[in-house]
Amino acid sequence: MARKLPMYKAIAEAIAQEMERDENVFVMGEDIGAYGGIFGATNGLLEKFGPERVRDTPISESAFIGAALGAASKGMRPIVELMFVDFFGVAMDQIYNHIAKAHYMSGGQVRMPIVITTAIGGGYSDAAQHSQCLYGLFAHVPGLKIVIPSNSYDAKGLMISSIRDDNPVMYFFHKGLMGLGWMPSPDEAAVEVPEEPYTVPIGEAKVVREGDDVTIATVSRMVYEALWAAEELEKDGISAEVIDLRTLVPLDKETLVNSVRKTGRLLVVDEDYMSYGMSGEIIATVVERIGNELRALPRRIAYPDIPVPYSRVLERFVLPDKEKIVKTVKDMVG
Amino acid sequence: MGVEEIPKETLLEIYRTMHKIRTYEETLAKWYYEGKSPRFDISAGPIPGELHLSSGQESAAVGVCVHLKDEDAVMGTHRAHHFAIAKGVDLKKMTAEIFGKATGLSGGKGGHMHLFDAAKNFSCSGIVGASFPQAVGVGIAAKLKGEDYVAVAVGGDGAANQGTFHEALNLAALWKLPVIFLIEDNGWAISVPKDKSTAVAKNSERAKAYGIPGVSVDGADVIAVYEVAKEAVERARRGEGPSLIEVRTYRLRGHFEGDPQLYRPKEDFELAKEKDPLANFRKLLLEKGIATEEELARIEEENEREVREAIDFALNSLYPEPEEALKGVFAGGE
Ligand SMILES: Cc1ncc(C[n+]2csc(CCOP(=O)(O)OP(=O)(O)O)c2C)c(N)n1
């Protein structure tokens, strides 16, 4: 049976069902127990599974994320929460030099079935150390799978896939999609979610809206900005196709390239920093394959290469949004 | 040493600053909820984003900063208004910063968790445990320049479990640097109580491992903090190296504003009231005949006026020009 769930409940339900199915699954992180996770992703787990399997940790990210490696090497399947992705710095060595590389460096002897969950995104004036996306930075490192759901159905299915995956998966949820009472979220992000466990494969993009004139490729909260822009563009007779990439590693190049082949135009929208990131990667992926078939130069709207400012007027000015998408698409098509 | 040996002006100054901090924060809290009802929405109102207040912890800031000069550095945490005010940061500019205005300390780019005042050598950070190594660097500079300034690194009891704390203690001890490591122990790291996160009862004990003095002091008694800090600052100025001070305090409010605090037992709220350093100090000043009711009332009125003026200044200031967001990433250019 399906019922509408906010994203945070869908994620917590996925974790609970996997913990029931497999006793090797356990959760660690700051405030993930009694608090249920600052963004609700572990809501209700402590009551169900107790403090041995739902472990509140000290503020020692390097230690508890590194500990995930040790536990995984002994057959456990840890899920660790890094409260905000912005805090990765204190634990990065364990993530990118160890967790990401153990399988390769060990010649395949060691597996790292670890899920690192973390919150991304701005838009609510939390400033430069609490508003970043940074998935591009992790996607740059070989050995990490990168999952970024945009609605509760995908969130549950992708979480179950991530837990069952034998590789380290970084699972990014946008604070502004979780459906928390105190943090605005588009209504569209809370969709029908089946009660029973199911998977959404890692590495499959989704065409969330079909169109003929331009492909808008994006992830996470920007999916909604793109969809709202597409509605507006339709009034002007412009038909936009919107692709939710859902995972960056592996990247579903086929869906992406097929769409751009059909529309002849590509716009990438990204809430992460512009340079050396997702937007450049997606454009390169398409241009390398079908550059000669494009009807317009590919464009991108990304977060500019500046720290996220605190003041609302400053932050609004730089965040990608519907208006910027509409304007850019009109430029491209006109 | 007792309260009798401290000059009256110093005692009144301590009271003035503690009361100013309390008045300021309680006023700020009221403004924080403006525009956030009937539904609490973190992004709404004149003060968006997170807000961590220090009510109940004033003694830690005032008891230490009263010994400091402008040249001395204080490096605060996400909860830093009390240290900013005690270090002499301009209240108007600080308030304008928190309201995201162009007249703020950083023109609205930093916000509540990222207050910078270079003239007062004050800074703070949203990353837990960031201050400790940074203060070590200030200590190195003092040594290399042959100056007698000191650095105070502030962290919560939660922050003392971060690797940076231990690395910085070792380095400061090794190099005999003029650094004071100040652990503000309010018993909680968001929802995780200290006894569930920290293997030792007192963080001051950790000083032993690095061969430096470590003292634990009751934050309900600002004079006790004053005395311990005096010794540490003098020691540092004499070139005798770092100290570790733990101030045991209580949070009168939630971790952040809007925190439902469901994790917190009733007794802890009661203790917080009982251990209120401001109320205790007021009582002491009257009981010992150090100040009269009228003298204190005059100070309180002055504080209330100053706080009102700071809020008015912030409210009447303009927001920055949106384009300002793009400037200032690098020194020496746009
Ligand atoms: C590196 C890092 N990890 C986690 C957080 C999230 N966080 C912010 S405040 C906090 C609790 C801090 O507790 P403590 O150090 O005791 O200070 P208090 O809030 O009690 O003043 C946490 C976990 C962070 N900001 N930075």
Image (spheres, coloured by chain):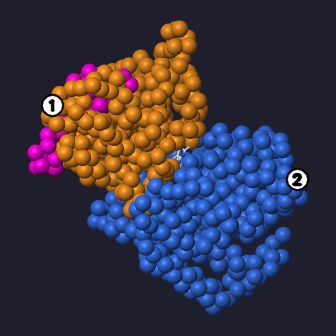
Q: Between residue B270 and residue B107, name the one nearer to us.
A: B107
Q: Closer to the observer: label 2 or label 1?
A: 2
The residue lying at 77 percent from left, 41 percent from top is B170
The response on whether ligand 1 sits within 8 Å of label 1 is: no
Q: What residue type is labelled 1?
A: Met
Image spot of residue B256 (x, y percent): 47, 57
In the picture, which chain is blue?
B
- Dividing the image into 4 quarters, which one contains the N terminus of chain B? bottom right
According to the picture, the residue beneath numbered tag 2 turns out to be: B240
- Amino acid type of disc 2? Glu
Disc 2 C-beta below 8 A from ligand 1: no
Chain label for disc 2: B
**Residue B325 in view, yes or no:** yes
Please identify which colour was used for chain A in the image.
orange
Same-chain check, marks 2 and 1: no
Which image quarter: residue B236? bottom right
Please tell me the numbered disc located at residue A1: 1
Which residue is located at x 44 percent, y 67 percent?
B320
Can you give x and y, in whole percent of width and height, for residue A302 in the image? Answer: 37, 44
* Left or right, B48 with reference to B245: left
In x, y percent, where is residue B172? Answer: 79, 46
The foreground one among B231 and A128 is: A128
Q: How far apart are marks 2 and 1 (CA)?
A: 70 Å
Which chain is home to disc 1? A
> What secondary structure is found at the residue carrying circle 1?
loop
Asked if the stretch drawn in magenta spans residue B24, the answer is no
Tell me the residue at 54%/27% (across/down).
A96
Magenta-colored span: A232-259
